[in-house]
């Protein structure tokens, strides 16, 4: 199995000069936790909800709060993670899964050519593949799932 067979192809991205406020808004409205950061068609970083909660950027947020009151904002490039681990569409799914587990990350941008983002492969995509392989059927929305009390 290859990454290209399981990756999410509809990717929302953001430019490095965009505001953190805009990144938060996009994550919230699209119900996503990761945004590839793209400049002139090439991946330059990634910003995640985890990045925005890191203690190392607490100073940035104090400054952001000050600037926000002045009507300014912090740019995504000030808080993004760079460089970014990536995979290619032809990467074996097991290799991608191993990277996700070993590096304790939730997503890998899938790049082609000179850094053009063509998709993302996330833990959820890997689990879908596993369910299909083990059960022989596609993962469906389980409305009958029972949550523990």
Image (tube, rainbow, N blue to C red):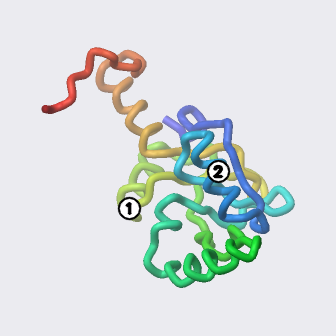
Task: Classify 100 as above or below 92.
Answer: below
Of 102 and 11, the residue lying toward us:
11
Q: Determine whether the residue tagged by mark 1 lies in a helix, strand or loop.
A: loop
Q: Is residue 131 left or right of residue 38?
A: left
Q: Residue at x 58, y 80 (%)?
A: 60
* Residue 118 on image: x %, y %: 71, 44
Name the residue at the front extreme. 69
The Cα–Cα distance between marks 1 and 2, rounded to whole angstroms, is 25 Å
Check the picture and name the quadrant holding the C terminus: top left
Q: Is residue 93 left or right of residue 73?
A: left
* Camera-side mark, 1 or 2: 2
- Give the residue at x 65% y 43%: 119
Tell me the residue that label 2 is attached to. Answer: 25
Q: Please state the horizontal and vertical placement of residue 11, each as a whole percent of the image.
A: 67, 42
Residue 107 against residue 134 in the figure, above or below:
below
First in residue order: circle 1 vs circle 2: 2
Identify the residue under disc 1: 104
Vertical order, 54 against 149 (above or below): below
Residue drawn at x 42%, y 46% as measured from the top left: 94
């Amino acid at each position: 199995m290859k990454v290209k067979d399981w990756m999410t192809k509809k990717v929302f991205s953001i430019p490095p000069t965009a505001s953190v406020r805009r990144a938060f808004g996009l994550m919230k409205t699209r119900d996503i936790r990761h945004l590839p950061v793209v400049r002139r068609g090439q991946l330059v970083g990634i910003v995640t909800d985890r990045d925005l909660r890191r203690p190392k950027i607490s100073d940035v947020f104090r400054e952001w709060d000050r600037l926000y009151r002045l009507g300014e904002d912090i740019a995504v490039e000030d808080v993004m993670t760079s460089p970014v681990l990536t995979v290619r569409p032809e990467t074996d799914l097991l290799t991608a899964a191993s990277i996700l587990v070993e590096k304790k990350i939730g997503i890998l941008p899938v790049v082609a050519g000179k850094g053009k983002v063509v998709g993302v492969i996330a833990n959820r995509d890997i689990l879908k593949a596993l369910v299909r392989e083990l059960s022989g059927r596609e993962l469906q929305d389980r409305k009958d799932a029972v949550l523990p009390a």
